[in-house]
């Protein structure tokens, strides 16, 4: 299950920049600045993260109650780009902010 989720995040992270670029230029900046903007403007906090095969950090941020969410991809250089955003973010049942739901059930 963990590897499926990581693969899904990686697939989304590599596809979304292409889709975003077709519609508009992605919003980019230094990682710390981008995180501060997501927190300041939307009250979003990190709810998930993973590493891509090429060293990219993929993070999902969500506001309380899931009203908004954003996906940020950060390169090893520290440049971060917003590659996706939306509304109605939902955590899996039983997640409660922990990563226990990623672990395989025995």
Image (spheres, helix red, strand yellow):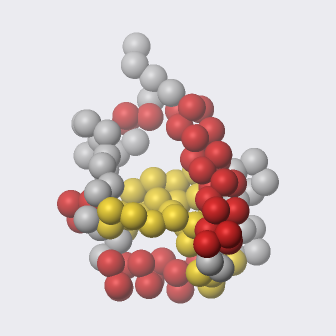
Q: Please state if 23 lies on the left or on the right of 47 as rendered.
A: right
Figure quadrant of residue 98: top left
Position in image of residue 47 (x %, y %) = 39, 57
* Residue 51 visible in the snapshot: no
Up/down of 77 relative to 12, above or below: below
Figure quadrant of residue 82: bottom right
Q: Please state if 56 lies on the left or on the right of 82 as rendered.
A: right
Nearest the viewer among 87 and 78 is 87
**Which quarter shows the C terminus?**
top left
Q: Which residue lies furthest to the top in this view?
A: 106
Residue shown at the point (57%, 32%) measured from the top left: 4
Residue shown at the point (58%, 41%) measured from the top left: 8
Up/down of 7 relative to 44, above or below: above
Position in image of residue 23 (x %, y %) = 61, 72
Residue shown at the point (74%, 57%) measured from the top left: 55
Up/down of 60 relative to 43, above or below: above
* Residue 96 visible in the snapshot: yes
Q: Please state if 81 lies on the left or on the right of 89 as rendered.
A: right
Residue shown at the point (32%, 67%) measured from the top left: 68
Q: Please tell me how many numbered marks the rendered image carries.
A: 0
Q: Residue furthest left?
A: 65
Position in image of residue 57 (x %, y %) = 63, 60
């Amino acid at each position: 299950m963990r590897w499926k989720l990581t693969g899904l995040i990686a697939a989304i992270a590599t596809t979304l920049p292409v889709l975003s670029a077709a519609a508009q230029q992605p919003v980019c900046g230094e990682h710390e600045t981008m995180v501060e903007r997501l927190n300041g403007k939307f009250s979003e906090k990190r709810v998930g993260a993973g590493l891509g095969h090429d060293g990219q950090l993929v993070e999902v941020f969500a506001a309380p109650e899931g009203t908004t969410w954003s996906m940020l991809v950060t390169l090893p250089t520290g440049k971060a780009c917003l590659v996706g955003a939306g509304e109605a973010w939902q955590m899996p049942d039983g997640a409660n902010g922990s990563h226990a739901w990623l672990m395989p059930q025995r």
